[in-house]
């Protein structure tokens, strides 16, 4: 670890490394250098992201663009955009590792305890959209092809049920039947994209509440983090995934299922903040279908967790047996409460 760390921060000690965050894919540490400055050191999971160099190219291009825009608008707070620490041998990667500056004075939340937090996160994600409006989306690498192709996710789910490699399908017949009954939803947004009814934008694609840091003093959004899945996509999924985590009364892996409920006031607060920041750039087809985005993405997440459970937990990190099933069940319950 010391060797890796010194490729980015020659005067930091590995003794200061502490695990950070709740990510399900990458491995993340906070680290402090000899001057007391804090950084985030992260190993990209190459089983999920086979091309870390492409991930970093996308990330650096997008953050540079946002920084330029903010500077042009006179914004001086450096915390507003992630910034990466170059490796001593050049570039921003050492093997699969990278390092960024810690966003100080701000925190990430797994779930919200007041609607104001959703208004703030809505503004943060809306601002992200606004700043990237006009970015040539097609120049970004599609680091995870078909990441939010819900139709293909549905096909992968059916395949997992069919193969049943872990012998678990019989335990989850109810969940399988429920998801299959909503098959038509899987093609809804994909169909609109294919027919050209929705524009492709640069989207974040993992807009959970904990991926926008809120200022510890003012509660306002400071910085959108976790840019690995920034790719061409639709704003409907970004809106939807933020609702999934932010307008939910419990964490996605809450084992007591009745604690998981949809919170309409939180949803409205997010929408208000989001539209205040980026409403002006959205097309009518986008504005009119934001809640469809929430339904589809929650459906997709339920399917993804259940697929991983059926496949024997090979994709997401799990902390206990049945973790993915717990996640799938909270998502199904949440989905069933989102108004059509
Ligand atoms: C994964 O690793 P993390 O927590 O940033 C996943 C997202 C899911 C999320 C669910 C590349 O993100 O799609 O929404 O877990 N990322 C990838 O918590 O699959
Ligand atoms: Mg992520």
Image (cartoon, rainbow, N blue to C red):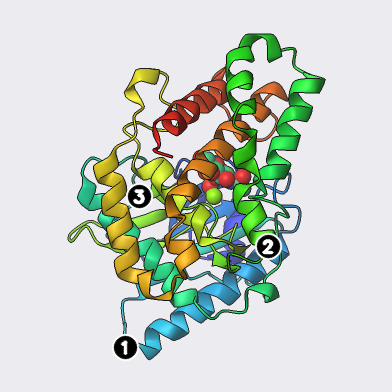
Q: What is the number of callouts on the image?
A: 3
* Residue 284 placement (x, y as % from top left): 45, 67
Q: Is residue 180 left or right of residue 279?
A: right
Question: What residue appears at the point 54 percent right and 43 percent down from the top-left corner?
Answer: 296
Distance from Cα at disc 2 to Cα at disc 3: 37 Å
Instruction: Please report the residue visible at 26 percent of the width from the left and 56 percent of the height from the top.
Output: 119
Name the residue at the right extreme: 163
Q: Nearer the viewer, mark 2 or mark 3?
A: 2
Q: Is residue 141 left or right of residue 278?
A: right
Residue 146: % across, % down: 71, 52
Q: Quadrant of the C terminus?
A: top left
Question: Toward which corner of the image does residue 254 lie, by quadrant?
Answer: top left
Residue highlighted by disc 2 = 195
Q: Name the residue under label 1.
A: 74
* Residue position for label 3: 108
| Mark 3 touches mark 1? (CB < 8 Å) | no
Distance, label 3 to label 1, CA atoms, is: 26 Å
């Amino acid at each position: 670890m010391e060797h890796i760390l010194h490729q980015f921060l020659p005067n930091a000690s590995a003794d200061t490394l502490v695990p950070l965050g709740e990510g399900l894919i990458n491995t993340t540490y906070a680290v402090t250098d000899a001057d007391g400055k804090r950084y985030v050191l992260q190993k990209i999971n190459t089983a999920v992201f086979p091309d870390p160099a492409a991930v970093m190219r996308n990330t650096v291009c997008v953050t540079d663009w946002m920084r330029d825009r903010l500077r042009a608008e006179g914004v001086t707070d450096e915390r507003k955009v992630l910034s990466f620490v170059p490796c001593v041998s050049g570039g921003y990667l050492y093997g699969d590792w990278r390092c960024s500056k810690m966003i100080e004075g701000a925190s990430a939340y797994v779930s919200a305890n007041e609607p104001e937090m959703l208004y703030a996160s809505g503004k943060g994600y809306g601002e992200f959209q606004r700043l990237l409006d006009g970015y040539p989306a097609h120049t970004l690498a599609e680091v995870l092809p078909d990441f939010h192709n819900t139709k293909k996710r549905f096909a992968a789910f059916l395949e997992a049920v069919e193969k049943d490699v872990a012998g678990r399908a019989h335990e989850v017949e109810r969940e399988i039947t429920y998801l299959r009954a909503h098959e038509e939803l899987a093609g809804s947004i994909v169909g609109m994209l294919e027919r050209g009814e929705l524009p492709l934008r640069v989207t974040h694609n993992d807009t959970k509440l904990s991926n926008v840091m809120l200022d510890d003093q003012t509660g306002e959004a400071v910085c959108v983090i976790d840019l690995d899945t920034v790719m061409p996509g639709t704003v409907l999924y970004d809106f939807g995934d933020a609702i999934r985590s932010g307008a939910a009364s419990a964490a996605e892996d809450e084992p007591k299922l009745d604690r998981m409920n949809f919170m309409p006031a939180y949803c409205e607060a997010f929408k208000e903040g989001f539209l205040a920041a980026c409403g002006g750039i959205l097309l009518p087809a986008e504005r009119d279908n934001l809640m469809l985005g929430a339904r589809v993405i929650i459906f997709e997440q339920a399917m993804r967790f259940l697929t991983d459970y059926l496949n024997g937990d090979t994709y997401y990190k799990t902390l206990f047996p049945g973790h993915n099933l717990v996640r799938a069940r909270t998502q199904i319950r949440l989905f069933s409460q989102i108004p059509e």
